Amino acid sequence: MKNLKPHPHVIKLIGCATESDPLLVLIEYVPYGDLLGYLRKSRGLSDTYFNNPDRKPETNLTSKQLMRFAWQIADGMAYLSSRKIIHRDLAARNVLVGEGEKCKVTDFGMARNVQQDDIYTKQSRGRLPVKWTAYEALLYGTYTTQSDVWSYGVLLYEILTIGGSPYPGVNARQIATKLQEGFRMPKPKHVDNKLYQIMLWCWEQNPTDRPTFAKLKETMKQMERNHKTYVNLKEYDNSLYANTEDLIAE
């Protein structure tokens, strides 16, 4: 983080204390908490990650706002990938929402509730966020920037379902087998097929067949301009995406 130049869609490091306990990292203030909680609270669901009574997310987020979130994160990840940084845990819970609803990619050990089985499942290499982890990382422990692209596709699903849980009803321990069988999450009814094809592109089994973040940044910016074409919130079914099991502390 110290080597990164400030970027509007990546969290800014202000300072750190490493020579005495406790180790501390000081980052810029982001008043709206994590994106997952922001999305869920915008439709009236509770969120155990972040609670600030003075800061309320907007209710009934528009398709334009959702597409802007998607573009901002692609922009932040395009910068990180250009600096050869592999995130390994890209998800809505690891994006923070700052002033003006500006999304900022974060991580650096800041993931919450890492012991929850629905998010981080024990593997020989440690606990993995299975539902966000790329095919090759899950099966072979291989991580590249293109692994992050897979995770971005899952994050896109989280955004477009306004905080829906990936692979609803599927146990994390079944994910690797289902992916090997060719399973991918189905298209949400309110999402246009062209936007769903972006998700499927991110979930290509061969990492080299996936888009780069530079391409995603460009594509999502174009789609943001025509947001109503790609997201029809009049067809959004809130009951389908009310699954908040992963928010319940064990």
Image: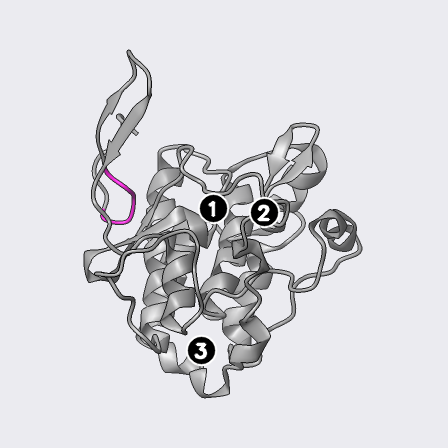
Q: Secondary structure at mark 3?
A: helix
Q: Position of residue 207 (x, y in %)?
A: 60, 45
Query: In whole angstroms, how far apart are the C-alphas of marks 3 and 1?
Result: 23 Å
Query: Residue 102 is drawn in which quadrant?
Result: bottom left
Look at the image and give the residue range highlighted in magenta.
Answer: 8-12
What mark, if any, has residue 101 been given in the picture?
Answer: none
Q: Position of residue 11 (x, y in %)?
A: 28, 42
Residue 113 vs 72, above or below: the answer is: above
Q: Residue at x 56, y 68 (%)?
A: 197
Q: Is residue 171 left or right of residue 94?
A: right
Of callouts 1 and 2, the N-terminal one: 1
Q: Residue at x 55, y 43 (%)?
A: 147
Q: Is residue 107 left or right of residue 143?
A: left
Of callouts 2 and 3, the N-terminal one: 3
Q: Position of residue 3 (x, y in %)?
A: 27, 26
Q: Position of residue 12 (x, y in %)?
A: 24, 38
Q: Residue at x 44, y 54 (%)?
A: 48
Of badges 3 and 1, the one in the foreground is 1
**Which residue position is annotated with label 3?**
230
Q: Is residue 25 left or right of residue 231?
A: left
Q: How is the image coloured?
A: one colour
Q: Nearer the viewer, residue 139 or 167?
A: 167
Mark 2 surroundings within 10 Å by alpha-carbon count, few (fewer than 14), some (14 through 19), many (20 or more): few
**Which residue position is annotated with label 2?**
250
Query: Is residue 9 shown in magenta?
Result: yes
Q: Is residue 222 visible?
A: no
Amino acid at pointer 2 = Glu
**Which residue position is annotated with label 1?**
90
Amino acid at pointer 3 = Tyr
Q: Is residue 44 visible?
A: yes
Query: In whole angstroms, how far apart are the C-alphas of marks 1 and 2?
Result: 23 Å
Query: In whole angstroms, how far apart are the C-alphas of marks 2 and 3?
Result: 37 Å
